[in-house]
Amino acid sequence: MGKKVKKEVESPPKDVFDPLLIESKTAATVVLMLSSPEEEVLAKACDAIYKFASKGDENKVTLLGLGAVEPLYKLISHEDPIVRRNAVMVFGIMASNHDVRKLLRELDVTNSLISRLAPEEDVVIHEFATLCLAHLAAEYTSKAQIFEQGGLEPLIRLLGSPDPDVSKNSVECIYLLVQDFQSRAAVRELNVIPPLLELLKSEYPVIQLLALKTLEVISNDRETRIILTEHQVLDYLLKILETKEFSDLHVEALAVVGSCLEDVDTMQSIQQTGGLKKLLSFIGVSTVPDVQKNAAKAIAKAAYDSENRKILNEHEVEKYLINLLGNDNDGVKAAASQAISAMCENLASKRAFGPQGIPQLVQLLSSDNEEVKEAAVIALANLTAASPSNASAVAEAEGIQPLINTLSAQRDGAIANAATVLTNVAMQEPFRLNILHHGIMSALVGPLRSTNSLVQSKAAFAVAAFGCDADARNELRNASGLGPLIELLHSKNEEVRRNACWAVMVCASDEPTAVELCRLGALEILEEINLSTGHKNNFSEGALEKLLDNNLSQKYSQMGYLSSSNIITDGFYDCGQVQPGVRFLSLEELSKQELTDRRALIFVNAKPQNIVPVVEEKPQDTSYEQTNLSSSILRRGSREKASLTASPVEEKQELSGRRSSLSKGSTREKGSRKGKGKKEEEKVKEDDVQITSEVQDEVNLENSHWLPPADFILLDYINDASKIILPLTTTWKQVVVLAQFVADKMGGPIERDRLHDFSWELHISEIEFELKCNAVPIGKVKKGTFYHRALLFKVIADRIGIGCSLVRGEYNRAWNEVKLVDDSPQGIAGLLLPPQEYIVDLMFEPGYLMKQGSAEADRYKFI
């Protein structure tokens, strides 16, 4: 009999814990489970966290606060594929939060994520790893990390993934990465274009859209455009544009087309295949604003090349752009204006735009949209450049006032180009006057104060263009525009500084403006500019010269020289040499100073005032004692010798009789004026009575403009000299007689060894004391030394047409230089010798002419 064997059941090992199902409704508990050594727990914890994070951004923030990111980071590289997959899924979801991304950057998770893109990984890991990278690529720092750690290559490979989510995330990440130029170059080398073109065939619009956006960005590089052309990308794009079902892709497709058309080869290719005609036809029939806008942008990009402009002009692209100007959408108007700006570099296009395009662009200047206004005025600036017909069209379209209004626009580009258009239009005289009547100079003051160098440059250029008109200069001066203009002379921008110098040179064309410019410091700034080889320019030198030529008092004070072309007029004064850095005071300021022992200033004012002081009826006395320099109670008067133009005499006298005639009756003191006759006195009084009531209504005591007193003695000198000198037949004789005339009026000839006894200083001091003023009219000087006589000679010579210069020397010396032709030439009969320069003796032998450079001339000047 066999024995029965009893089978015993083995009990589990004592160190093994029975399976336990744990349920938790607390996120903190689940986060703690991420540190478990058990793969099943880790996988379930990651799955639970994924579901929790998917419910909203607040949950992501909660998980971040609970410290879930750090343990999850360790798990994305876990050996178990399920744990790894679930951890990556959590990262893909949580990376949409900004604070989470910030921590991920600090942890440098990009390298681990890129490792998860390996072909052997699960497709779900590919999906969420690319999603996480796409979130991270939205920020620059992460872009750099992905690029540097080699993320582009696996991303490009995944563009061909059969999973649409992987393709979508990969192309989105690449789109964000190629915003940086390094990535653009890299994806070209990695042959990204073929897989991108394949994505255009995707059944998912979002993938097609991202592929087009990526193509648009990378097509900004010429090398990439060449590759796109080789792959016939335009065929793909034109098919998209011809398919109505793809209307949501038309905008981006046109953007890529625009980039491709920048290359001439591509443009020629699309023209030959008929694609360009299709494209323009599509633009003409489309009513979608974004499509129209991108179409205009595409034309603008293509039009930057001259050959492309010719091709577009042949296809009459101008009419399409003009039609777009009438669109209701501001974006379309701005894009069309920009395209016109580019196209009008072609002369044929510029002419085509004129008749219909310019009136529409002028209307856009009144747009409330600043972008539209700026684009329109830029187009007008390009259209009117070197095109008188288009400039006329702007004026005829009543564009002047809108352009002036645009000078106060919000955008610097609009302001600068408005100034340019106005300058272009002003090339034609009638339009320039029209612009001036609209107050252009006052409107330019604001742009002159701009901080934008382009605005400053164009505004200064406009001032130079309009400043040739006296009324314009007055307007700018009255609008306080000279100050801002002078400030631009300090600019570090070469063009601004150059145009400012040009404007100052133009504005200095009249004495009042020149004086004001000097008062504001323009002279010192220009001198400083001209001392710098880096800052000096042709206009800075011209401006300095023009300023001084129209402010002869300051020129003579600073430079000690007036040329024959520097004509001394009324209001000139000689206050001696002003030291560098000392402000040059006006005649009014100097006249109102208290009497001092400093050198008297000598002024010139031979012009009788139209208004003279109102006094009680007394015996007529024109002496200077009755005339106060600061007198402001003025009335009109009449005077027989008001004209400064000398009347010619009928009888000519010979040079031999001049000395006697000069010594007999031509020196008329102030008292001798009473011998003019009762009839003249009665006529003056009668005129005075007739105008008294009128003057009382017109004169405002407080607002009367200060004028120096008229120098009637100087007026007599000029008239007498004119009668004596003008009939003489040669300039040589005129110079000699004028020198004798001047010397006779200022004390006569002086012996050289008795010069120290000629007490002219005391005489001048007595005049100053008599007038109680430092300012002395030159006609009042009866004992004059070198500089008095030289000044009087220059004043009279300028009035009667004798060319001479005035030179200041040292020790109260001054002299006149004249250029004369010897009327008795030596040598061959009839030989005309060139003129020679002579110094005119006014002191010792009045009328004696000394050759420049001779010993006697040097002695006259320096000894």
Image (tube, rainbow, N blue to C red):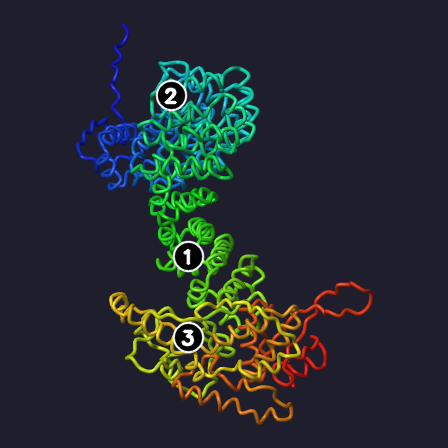
Residue lying furthest right: 828
Q: Nearer the viewer, mark 2 or mark 3?
A: 3
**Residue tagged by mark 1?**
473
In front: 267, or 467? 467
Q: Is residue 471 above or below residue 359?
A: below
Percent from the top left, x then y, of residue 502?
Answer: 50, 55
Residue drawn at x 46%, y 82% as measured from the top left: 780
Amino acid type at mark 1: Arg
Indicate the secondary structure of the residue bearing disc 2.
Answer: helix
Question: Which of pointers 3 and 1 lies earlier in the amino acid sequence?
Answer: 1
The quadrant holding residue 849 is bottom right
Residue 451 versus residue 216: which sits nearer the camera? 451
Tag 3 secondary structure: loop
**Identity, as a three-letter code, of the amino acid under mark 3:** Ala
Task: Say which residue label 3 marks.
Answer: 710
First in sequence, mark 1 or 2: give its number: 2
| In this picture, residue 88 sits left or right of residue 862 | left
Relative depth, front residue between 749 and 676: 676
Measured Cα–Cα span from mark 1 to mark 2: 57 Å
Confirm or deny contact between disc 1 and disc 2 (CB under 8 A): no
First reached walking from the N terminus: tag 2 or tag 3: 2
Which residue is disc 2 drawn over?
249
